[in-house]
Amino acid sequence: MRFVDTNVLLYSISTVGGEQHKAERARSLLESRDLALSVQVLQEFYVQATRATRSDRIDHDIATGLVESFQRFPTQVITPAVMTAALHSSRRFSISYWDAAIIEAARVLGCEEVLSEDLNAGQVYDGVTVVDPFA
């Protein structure tokens, strides 16, 4: 299974001209059945997709519908155990807590890859490899 970071979801709704290739790639990825995500990713998606300063902002009802639709994928909650593991990984790998929470949620779900352009492509975090799906 592959874990999807927030940027993939955001590109899937993008109407920005310069992001057309990434938008098409993200929508294609979301047709896959081997994807997973976390509640954190869904929260970040909602906040960023509805942000007033976003040029292609979507409204609450559309964003909520998409969040519900994305839950067709296995979705990891942020439990105390995931949070604690992320705190340790953040320090161990010198990454932000939020990035570490992505890695640890992926690990709990048994994902070998995290699809993200925000983390270092090719970096391996104890068996979880970051892959930039837009490279």
Image (cartoon, grey):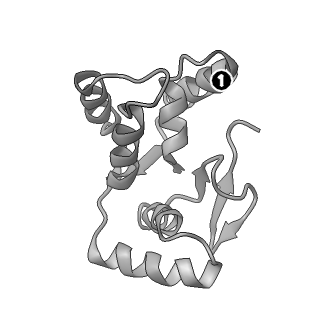
Across the whole image, how many numbered discs are drawn on residues? 1
Name the residue located 37 percent from the left edge and 73 percent from the top edge.
Answer: 82
- Give the amino acid type for the residue marked by disc 1 in the picture: Glu
- Pinpoint residue 25: horizontal percent, then vertical percent: 63, 26
Could you tell me which secondary element the residue under label 1 belongs to?
helix
Compared across the picture, whether 96 is left or right of 18 comes to left
- Left or right of 123 in this view: 32: left
* Extreme residue in the front direction: 53
User: Horizontal placement of 87 versus 63: left or right?
Assistant: right
Residue 30: x %, y % from top left:
49, 30
Residue at image x 47%, y 20%?
56
Which quadrant, please, contains the C terminus?
A: top right
Q: Is residue 17 above or below residue 30?
A: above
**Category of crowding for the residue at label 1, using alpha-carbon neighbours closer than 10 angstroms: few (below 14), some (14–19), many (at least 20):** few
Closer-to-camera residue (91/32): 91
Q: Quadrant of residue 86?
A: bottom left
Q: Image point 60% across, 84% down: which residue?
A: 92
Q: Is residue 46 above or below residue 21?
A: below
Can you give x and y, in whole percent of width and height, for residue 129 in the image?
66, 61
Q: Is residue 90 above or below residue 74?
A: below
In this view of the protein, which residue sits in the foreground, 7 or 32? 7
Q: Position of residue 76 (x, y in %)?
A: 34, 57
Name the residue tied to disc 1.
Answer: 19
* Residue lying at 32% horizontally and 36% vertically, measured from the top left: 72
As drawn, 115 above or below 94 = above
